[in-house]
Each structure stands twice: as structure tokens, then as C-alpha cells.
């Protein structure tokens, strides 16, 4: 899973650069049909899935980072800490 | 803890992966020969198209009864008699019963451009043939025009529309419809009755065309002339296509009278833009002119020799248009 998380963004980079190349080539020679042939359509589908997966991962990482950062900076929850703890004048024994 | 790879190394890996992916794409897209499934719809050798044309022109005649230009057309008189030729040298012309091919070389635009014009008179349009490279319908099958000229025993041979580069468009060769897929490009149709028409894909119905007697069809374009024979202007085919390039054009005068035009470029001859090409076709008096694959693909052979100066020595192409020596 860790390897997938590492490879996924790079796959996205490669596919996006491929389509940039296709856009340039299609402007240069539209008759060769670089953008709408069957192979490009499959690659576009793969690119969409990878972008979606990458975006989910980025959002999920951002949320976790935010939550862990909030956990460090929030003031201690006093009521939670005093439950089960002997109050003034009380003895736990 | 594992150390991060340096950024430059990551960029290099991604670029290498991009290169490999593009190579693999190219191999599967247009390099590796791949036979394709064909429609194999056979056209009826009929005068149905001529009859349809006659009906249209009769209607136009009735509607324009006062017009002096109205001409009645009958299927029997659509194909012209081949004109008597004065003496033709072996290098510049060939003639037999029903077929005349004459070739001439011209300078244009003050000598900066050279073009070659093959004038064709055909009593039987089936002399106007096409062929696939390696005799196979598919992508990645290519051969040079000169090589195909020898294999086909052609008197005149020129590149076609390089159908193998794309899955789009219409491919009709020697009366067989191989493909009729959607395309934005103009489609050039040649019928058994010797007439030529340019159509949009929306107007092309494979079965109807087979019934109407379609003989050949190409998908490349654009069409260079308006219906009145004037040059189209303001082409929007992309920067490279619009620029000065070698060109191949199929021209049409009247049923049975055609022309093949090859313009040299990217060398001593400067080539023509699409606007200039359309202007030339108008000057030559074509009633219809259709742009085929150009650039390095533009090669014409006559009597087994290459007659033009192909850019970069030419390239292997997927199909040709030719007049066979046994037609002459």
C-alpha cells in the first residue's frame, strides 16, 4: 500500500505529461488522431482514476495532519482528566 | 529512517518513464502492423449515382428554366471521349483507348514553387485505382510510392490519404467500403459514373453509397474550392497544416476528367500554404479540389521514375492512387 502511495503521484505526472505531448502533436498533425483514438481514450480513463485516487490520498493526509496538529495544540480536557481522580477532600483509598 | 531521493533523480525517473510510455504508445498506435476489421461492403457498379445526379439537375433545370446555364445530363454521356492527343513524348504522356495521362512540370509564384500536374482522361473510371501498402488493410503497413509503383506495374502513382494513421473517417477502395467511421474531415467520393463529390460524414451512409456505385473515397481534406470553383480562404487546420508544405491534390474537372497535382516543398521549392494551394487549384480550373496527405508523403511516379523532389527523400505511406500500365 505504501508503494502504491509512492507510485501513484508519479504515474499521474507521467500521464499528464503524455497528454500535454498529445495536445501539441494534435495541433501539429490533427490527421494522426493522437487524442481521440482508442488507446488515448483508455489512457484518459486511467488518468482520471489515478487523479481521483491521488486527490483522495492528499485530502486524507491533509485531514490527518490537521487532526494530529490539533491534538498537540488543544488545551488539556480537565473534566476528562479529573474523572476517577479523587477530588478535594476525597480519598481514593 | 530512509533518506529521501534527491529531487533531480525523481524528475529524471519521471522523464524516463514518460519517454518509455510515449514509445510504447507510438508502437501500438501506428508502428506495429495491425490488421483491422473491415466492413467489406461491396459497391454496386451502377449508374444509380448518375441517375440521382440527373434527377437533381433536372429539378434544378426546372427551377432555373430561364437560366442559360442549365445543362441536361444523362448517364450515357457522363464520361467524356478521350481527346485526340498530339504527339506525346514517352516522358510526358501515355495514351491508349479510353485512357490519357499527360504530365507537365510548372513553376509558380515567380519560380519559388514547383509543381507537377498529371492530367487524366478516363472513359472507364475503374482505371483510377488505389492500393494498400503490403496489400493489407490496417495500421502500420507502409511502403514507398516508388516501391508500390513497381509492384503494381503503375504508369502513374501518387500517395493517398494515409488512412492507416487513424481509425477515423471513410475508406473506400476499388469499390469496397472498408470503413465508415465518424470524422470531422471532408470526404472525397469518386463514383463509377466518373463524378466526384465532397461530403461531410453526416451525409455519408455506407449502404446508400454502395447502392449508388461508389468506387473510391478518401478522408483527409480539406476541400479547397467552393461550389462555384472559387478558392476557399481562411483555413483552420492547425499551424503546421496551414503553413508552406509539399502538397498532393486530387483535382476534378468533369466526369472522367481528373488531375493529380503534387507541389514540392521544404527544399528548393518553398511549398504552398493551404490558401495558396486553393488559389492554384482555382487558376488551374478545377471544379473540385481535394487536399491529400502532404509533407514528406507527397511523391509522384510516372513511367517507374519519381518525378518530383520529395521532402526529406519521401516517406513510406499506407496507400496509393494509380493508373495501371495495363489500362494503357
Image (cartoon, coloured by chain):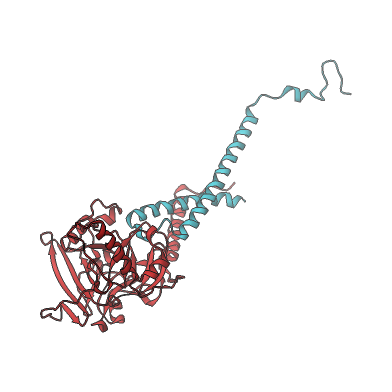
**Residue name at image x 32 percent, y 68 percent:** B51
Kindly give the residue lying farthest to the right in the view shown. A93
**Residue name at image x 27 percent, y 66 percent:** B296
In this rendered view, identify the residue nearer to me: A85 or B201. Answer: B201
Q: Is residue A75 left or right of residue A4?
A: right
- x, y (%) of residue B131? 34, 75
- x, y (%) of residue B229? 21, 59
In this rendered view, identify the residue nearer to me: B101 or B139. Answer: B101
Kindly give the residue lying farthest to the top in the view shown. A89
Give the colour of chain A.
cyan
Q: Quadrant of residue B152?
A: bottom left
In this rendered view, identify the residue nearer to me: B90 or B286. Answer: B286
- x, y (%) of residue B241? 28, 57
**Residue name at image x 46 percent, y 47 percent:** B7
Give the colour of chain B.
red
Q: Quadrant of residue B307?
A: bottom left
- x, y (%) of residue B205? 41, 63
- Let me know if residue B270 appears in the view: no
Number of on-image labels: 0
- When the figure is inspected, residue B95 is found, relative to residue B309, above or below; the finding is below
**Which quarter of the image is occupied by the C terminus of chain B?**
bottom left
**Residue name at image x 29 percent, y 51 percent:** B236
Amino acid at each position: 500500500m505504501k508503494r502504491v502511495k509512492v507510485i501513484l503521484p508519479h504515474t499521474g505526472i507521467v500521464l499528464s505529461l503524455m497528454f500535454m505531448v498529445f495536445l501539441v502533436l494534435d495541433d501539429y498533425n490533427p490527421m494522426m488522431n493522437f487524442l481521440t483514438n482508442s488507446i488515448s481514450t483508455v489512457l484518459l480513463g486511467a488518468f482520471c482514476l489515478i487523479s481521483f485516487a491521488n486527490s483522495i490520498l492528499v485530502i486524507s493526509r491533509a485531514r490527518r495532519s490537521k487532526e494530529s496538529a490539533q491534538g498537540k495544540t488543544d488545551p488539556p480536557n480537565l473534566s476528562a482528566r479529573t474523572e476517577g481522580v479523587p477530588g478535594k477532600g476525597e480519598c481514593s483509598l | 529512517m530512509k533518506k529521501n531521493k534527491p529531487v533531480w533523480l525523481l524528475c529524471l525517473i519521471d522523464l524516463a518513464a514518460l519517454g518509455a510510455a510515449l514509445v510504447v504508445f507510438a508502437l501500438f498506435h501506428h508502428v506495429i502492423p495491425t490488421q483491422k476489421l473491415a466492413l467489406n461492403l461491396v459497391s454496386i457498379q451502377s449508374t444509380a449515382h448518375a441517375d440521382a445526379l440527373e434527377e437533381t439537375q433536372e429539378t434544378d433545370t426546372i427551377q432555373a428554366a430561364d437560366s442559360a446555364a442549365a445543362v441536361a445530363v444523362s448517364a450515357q454521356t457522363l464520361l467524356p471521349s478521350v481527346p485526340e492527343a498530339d504527339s506525346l513524348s514517352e516522358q510526358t504522356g501515355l495514351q491508349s483507348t479510353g485512357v490519357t495521362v499527360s504530365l507537365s512540370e510548372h513553376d509558380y509564384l515567380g519560380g519559388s514553387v514547383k509543381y507537377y500536374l498529371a492530367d487524366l482522361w478516363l472513359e472507364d473510371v475503374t482505371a483510377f485505382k488505389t492500393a494498400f501498402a503490403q496489400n493489407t488493410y490496417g495500421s502500420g503497413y507502409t511502403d514507398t510510392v516508388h516501391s508500390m509503383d513497381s509492384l503494381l506495374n503503375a504508369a502513374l502513382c501518387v500517395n493517398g490519404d494515409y488512412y492507416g494513421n487513424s481509425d477515423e473517417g471513410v475508406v473506400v477502395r476499388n469499390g469496397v467500403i472498408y470503413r465508415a467511421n465518424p470524422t470531422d474531415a471532408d470526404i472525397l467520393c469518386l463514383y463509377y459514373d466518373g463524378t466526384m463529390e465532397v461530403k461531410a460524414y453526416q451525409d455519408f451512409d455506407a449502404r446508400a453509397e454502395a447502392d449508388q456505385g461508389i468506387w473510391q473515397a478518401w478522408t483527409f481534406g480539406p476541400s479547397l474550392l467552393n461550389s462555384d470553383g472559387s478558392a476557399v480562404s481562411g483555413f483552420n487546420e492547425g499551424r503546421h497544416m496551414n503553413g508552406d508544405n509539399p502538397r498532393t491534390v486530387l483535382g476534378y474537372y468533369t466526369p472522367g476528367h481528373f488531375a493529380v497535382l503534387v507541389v514540392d516543398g521544404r527544399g528548393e521549392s518553398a511549398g504552398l500554404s493551404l490558401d495558396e494551394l486553393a488559389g492554384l487549384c482555382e487558376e488551374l480550373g478545377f471544379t473540385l479540389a481535394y487536399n491529400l496527405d502532404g509533407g514528406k508523403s507527397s511523391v509522384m511516379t510516372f513511367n517507374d521514375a519519381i518525378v518530383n523532389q520529395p521532402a526529406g527523400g519521401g516517406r513510406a505511406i499506407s496507400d496509393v492512387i494509380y493508373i495501371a500500365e495495363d489500362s494503357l
